[in-house]
Amino acid sequence: MQRYFVQPDQMTDETVTITGENIKHISKVMRMGPGDQVICSDNQGRVAECTITEITDASVHLSISEWIGVKSELPISVTIAQGLPKHDKLEMIVQKGTELGADRFIPFQASRSIVKWDSNKSKKKTERLHKIIKEAAEQSHRNRMPECLEPVTFDKLISLSDSFTTKIVAYEEQAKRNETTRLARLLQNVDIEQDSIIVVIGPEGGLTEDEIQCLRGAGFVACGFGPRILRTETASLYVLSAVSYQLELLR
């Protein structure tokens, strides 16, 4: 069943109103009409099976048939802080990261990031990332859409990390030294009721030693993600899968 996200004020206890681009998707792409059913989420945890009652040029009106209590979110909040990669890799990272349960994405300008986002392009590119996240969240039946910030500086990333209780940085030098236990120990010891996780991943060239030392000073633990060296677009998918396995499948 097709899923759509709406604003909280568009969902009451009995009805839902859909506006914007989803109108065209419902009426033209999916060719749905009155009597057809969809799933709607208010992006704050409320999810309902709904029946279309009316479609106009300005909105789609639905009645709520049944509230859905299925939990599809990771049991702990995971933020992916991604050093800006080349080409369209960030689009793939947020798409697949959304499917795997990430709660937030923070792109940042690392020393070795080749890509530079100027202020004129940053907003437009971030809007595209939001669209990709929305579509991925609908496809994977997420109850919430992850947040994606506009790219921040490295110093700003350090400041934003203050609110997290578990801080991880992917460091290829640890993998080269056959360090394979830190990530597992960190995940085994998290408290899903109180903790939150942030994972910093460098761009293609990795993080500099100065950046690693700065992150360590801010409380980050440098971890190898297994014995192999992962591409930047693979690392976030690896760690999100590890979180899911440890905190969902083993419990």
Image (cartoon, grey):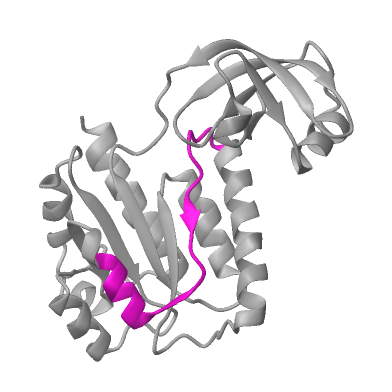
Percent of width and height locating residue 52: 75, 17
Percent x, y for residue 251?
20, 29
Image position of 233 (left or right of 224)? right
Compared with residue 114, is residue 190 higher up or lower down, i.e. above or below?
above
Q: Quadrant of the N terminus?
A: top right
Q: Is residue 145 magenta?
A: yes
Q: Which residues are magenta?
A: 140-161
Q: Write the residue at 60% across / 84% down.
A: 118
Picture quadrant where residue 221 is located: bottom left
Numbered marks: total: 0
Residue 221, placed above or below residue 58: below
Residue 143, given in percent of the width and then of the height, sits at: 48, 33
Q: Nearer the viewer, residue 123 or 79?
A: 123
| Residue located at (59% from left, 37% from top) | 7
**Residue 195, position as x, y percentages in the image:** 19, 47
Q: Nearer the viewer, residue 89 or 143?
A: 143
- Left or right relative to 104: residue 120: right
Identify which residue is drawn at 28% across, 47% down.
243
- Residue 5 vertical position relative to residue 234 in the rendered view, above or below: above
Taking the image as drawn, is residue 75 in sight? yes
Relative depth, front residue between 185 and 98: 98
Q: Is residue 231 visible?
A: no
Is 101 inside the magenta-drawn segment?
A: no
Residue at figure coordinates x 66%, y 23% from the top left: 16
